[in-house]
């Protein structure tokens, strides 16, 4: 199972094509659009989220509410396109001012300069339009499809914000359904109300200063059986594939599983998870410091992943840059931006991880239809029960 996306931040639409999605899965269209709406929420977002009301249209691969096994085509229209029809038009525009909204001053922290050098572009808009985090809209829609495959097998996905700037939320243990409900009601996706208020104040202060804030987000997936992924080749290790997916999200700079980097500070006896057995439960771990992985494979414990998002690179307090035409120093050009997108990034991370887990699930249990996958899945559960 794989997917590709296309489209620019100010183009007419974003497009995604999923290949290898099994047949006979009932698609809840509202669930896909719910994920898109979640991505647009969160305290600290900019004016673009007031313009766009993202909804996904399915243009292929689904008939009468169920997948057919054919490639699935997804489309999300950009409402802001109407303001950019000349600047972003595919056809040459005679008599137009070709320099209008041209970007010649690369913004520090963005793909502008590296992309301009790589693709030999003198208008850096040709780089920023595709490298924009607007691209994650389609990845969330794709993740919304993957989640529906996982839901067929009782696998649940949740996310929460752990830190924004220097404000860290207290860790709380609660059932995953409760975590989903509580964080959905929070404008910064936390369970700690005191931290919520301090995070909002920190975002306001950064906005007043023309600055931005990053943070740490966490994704938890429950109900995953042991044995997804493999130890036999480096590129089949599922934790490695999840790490790559997380780091592919714009502005993400780090990832960890379970106790993560804290493992460097502990002795081994306080890092590894002891193995237990119960006649009803089978094999399980006494703790989950490994975050649900050993040897690149799932252990059956919840998958726990955290990602670090840097502050958004577009600042109203512009940083110094160099004009690519004159080579003179200037302050970088400012594009419309958010002050803090960490709550939205939590949603994005949930969905890119859901995709990787769903892909590994299909690799393990195979099959072109839901019914075939279910037979394989149930047979495997019986096998490990008898182990």
Image (spheres, rainbow, N blue to C red):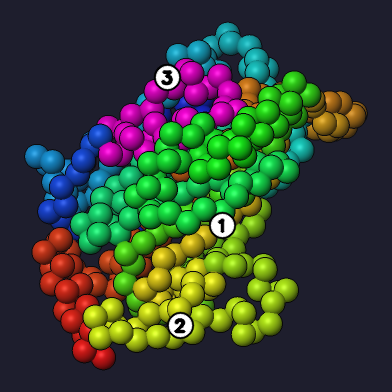
Q: Going by the image, does 326 lie left or right of 15?
A: right
Q: Looking at the rendering, in which quadrant would you find the C terminus?
A: bottom left
Q: Tag 2, which secondary structure?
A: loop
Query: Does the stretch in magenta take in 50?
Result: yes
Q: Earlier in the sequence, mark 2 or mark 1?
A: 2
Q: Is residue 92 visible?
A: no
Query: In which quadrant of the rendered view does residue 285 lie?
Result: bottom left
Query: In which quadrant of the rendered view does residue 220 lie?
Result: bottom left
Q: Earlier in the sequence, mark 3 or mark 1?
A: 3
Query: Does the stretch in magenta take in 41?
Result: yes
In front of the other: 304 or 311: 304
Residue at 90% across / 29% down in the picture? 329
| Residue positioned most to the right | 328
Crowd around label 2: few <14 · some 14–19 · many ≥20 (10 Å): some
Q: Is residue 79 visible?
A: yes
Q: Tag 1, which secondary structure?
A: strand
Q: Looking at the rendering, in which quadrant would you find the N terminus?
A: bottom left
Query: In which quadrant of the rendered view does residue 110 lie?
Result: top right
In front of the other: 262 or 240: 262
Residue under numbered circle 1: 306
> Where is 181 relative to 238, above or below?
above
> Bounds of the magenta span?
31-57
Residue at 30% across / 59% down in the picture? 155
Residue under numbered circle 3: 79
């Amino acid at each position: 199972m794989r997917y590709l996306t296309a489209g620019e931040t100010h183009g007419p639409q974003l497009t995604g094509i999923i290949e290898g999605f099994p047949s006979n899965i009932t698609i809840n269209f509202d669930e896909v659009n719910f994920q898109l709406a979640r991505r647009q929420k969160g305290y600290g977002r900019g004016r673009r989220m007031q313009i766009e009301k993202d909804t996904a249209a399915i243009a292929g691969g689904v008939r009468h509410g169920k997948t057919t096994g054919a490639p699935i085509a997804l489309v999300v229209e950009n409402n802001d396109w109407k303001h950019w029809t000349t600047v972003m038009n595919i056809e040459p525009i005679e008599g137009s001012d070709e320099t209008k909204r041209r970007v010649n001053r690369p913004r520090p922290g963005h793909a502008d300069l590296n992309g301009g050098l790589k693709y030999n572009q003198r208008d850096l808009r040709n780089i920023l339009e595709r490298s924009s985090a607007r691209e994650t809209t389609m990845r969330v829609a794709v993740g919304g499809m993957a989640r529906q495959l996982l839901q067929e097998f009782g696998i649940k996905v949740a996310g929460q914000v752990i830190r924004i700037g220097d404000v860290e939320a207290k860790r709380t243990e609660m059932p995953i359904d409760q975590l989903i409900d509580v964080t959905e009601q929070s404008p910064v996706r936390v369970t700690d109300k005191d931290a919520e208020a301090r995070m909002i104040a920190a975002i306001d202060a950064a906005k007043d200063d023309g600055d931005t804030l990053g943070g740490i987000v966490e994704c938890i997936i429950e109900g995953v059986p042991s044995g997804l992924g493999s130890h036999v080749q480096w590129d089949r290790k599922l934790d490695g594939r999840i790490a790559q997916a997380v780091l592919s999200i714009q502005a993400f700079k780090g990832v960890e599983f379970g106790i993560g980097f804290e493992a460097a500070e502990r002795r081994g006896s306080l890092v590894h998870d002891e193995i237990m057995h119960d006649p009803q439960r089978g094999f399980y771990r006494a703790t989950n410091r490994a975050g649900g992985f050993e040897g690149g494979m799932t252990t059956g414990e919840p998958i726990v992943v955290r990602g670090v998002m840097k502050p958004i690179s577009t600042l109203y307090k512009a940083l110094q840059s160099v004009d690519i035409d004159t080579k003179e120093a200037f302050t970088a050009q400012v594009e419309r931006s958010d002050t803090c997108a960490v709550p939205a990034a939590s949603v994005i991370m949930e969905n890119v991880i859901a995709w990787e887990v769903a892909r590994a699930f299909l690799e393990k249990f195979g099959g072109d239809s839901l019914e075939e996958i279910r037979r394989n899945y149930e047979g495997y559960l019986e096998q490990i029960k008898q182990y």
